[in-house]
């Protein structure tokens, strides 16, 4: 299997490891790695929590959608998207149209163990962040699955198995293409069958001779 337009887009909840595992995938696939949230922060010069504080979630989602529009136009990249990038229908369409989408899945309890001490997650700023994470999972998991071409568990072993599978599929596709080229070349070199010479009747109509 080849990646659509050479792109691999990672989706999943916060804590799924899109940045960490995305960097590993990019190195293995020899592609450029881009983190959409980090790119947005670099452009604006402020952190994601600050954007939420100043513009609210709606303002942040507008900027996120514009960033997804821009970054999905690139080729040969591994792109880690923000956890809420799939909330907008247009962003989901852009992801599906412009690359191969990989959902890094993790259960809420696993995510909670990774995020319980995080202080920079605006979507978890609630009286009960653990329950909030469960709510986000219930809301977003169907959207991730809707947009994904592949779903794997968000751990390094699963990611490396996915890379090996990509390599196997890619090698098989190259071998099939090479076989097809060889077969075509063989057909081109094959001698053409001689056209049979059919005798024409003589003027008397009583038979014919081959000159």
Image (cartoon, rainbow, N blue to C red):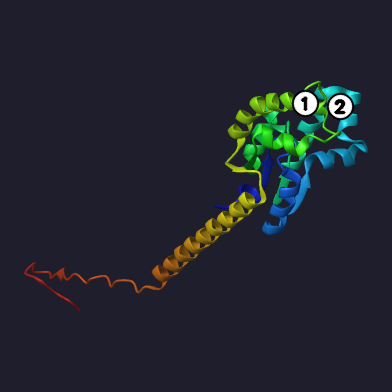
Q: Which of 199 and 148 is in front in this view?
A: 148
Secondary structure, mark 1, is helix
Q: Is residue 69 visible?
A: no
Neighbor class of circle 1 (other Cα within 10 Å; few <14, some 14-19, many 20+) is some
Q: Nearer the viewer, mark 2 or mark 1?
A: 1
> In the shown orientation, is residue 206 left or right of residue 17?
left
Q: In this view, does 54 lie above or below 2?
A: above
Query: In which quadrant of the rendered view does residue 150 lie?
Result: top right
Task: Report the label total.
Answer: 2
> Are circles 2 and 1 on residues that touch, CB within 8 Å?
no
Residue bearing mark 1: 129
> In the shown orientation, is residue 126 left or right of residue 76?
right
Q: Which of 160 and 26 is in front in this view?
A: 160
Q: Is residue 84 visible?
A: yes
Query: In which quadrant of the rendered view does residue 196 lie?
Result: bottom left
Which quadrant does the C terminus fall into?
bottom left
Q: Position of residue 169 (x, y in %)?
A: 53, 56
> In the shown orientation, is residue 183 left or right of residue 195?
right
Q: Which of 17 and 29 is in front in this view?
A: 17
Q: Position of residue 191 (x, y in %)?
A: 35, 74
Which numbered disc flags the more N-terminal residue, 2 or 1?
A: 2
Which residue occupies 66% across, 24% down? 139
Neighbor class of circle 2 (other Cα within 10 Å; few <14, some 14-19, many 20+) is some
**Label 2 to label 1: alpha-carbon separation:** 17 Å
Residue bearing mark 2: 52
């Amino acid at each position: 299997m080849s990646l659509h337009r050479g792109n691999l887009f990672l989706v999943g909840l916060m804590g799924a490891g899109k940045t960490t595992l995305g960097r590993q995938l990019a190195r293995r696939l020899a592609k450029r790695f881009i983190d959409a949230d980090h790119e947005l922060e670099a452009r604006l010069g402020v952190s994601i929590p600050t954007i939420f504080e100043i513009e609210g979630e709606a303002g942040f989602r507008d900027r996120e959608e514009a960033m997804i529009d821009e970054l999905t136009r690139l080729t040969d990249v591994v792109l880690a998207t923000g956890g809420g990038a799939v909330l907008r229908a247009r962003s989901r369409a852009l992801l599906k149209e412009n690359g191969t989408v990989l959902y890094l899945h993790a259960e809420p309890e696993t995510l909670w163990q990774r995020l319980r001490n995080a202080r920079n997650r605006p979507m978890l700023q609630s009286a009960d962040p653990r329950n909030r994470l469960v709510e986000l999972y219930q809301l977003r998991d169907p959207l991730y699955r809707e947009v994904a071409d592949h779903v794997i568990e968000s751990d390094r072993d699963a990611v490396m198995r996915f890379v090996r599978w990509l390599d196997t599929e890619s090698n098989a596709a190259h071998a099939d293409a090479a076989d097809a080229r060889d077969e075509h070349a063989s057909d081109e070199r094959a001698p053409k069958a001689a056209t049979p010479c059919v005798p024409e009747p003589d003027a008397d109509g009583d038979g014919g001779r081959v000159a």
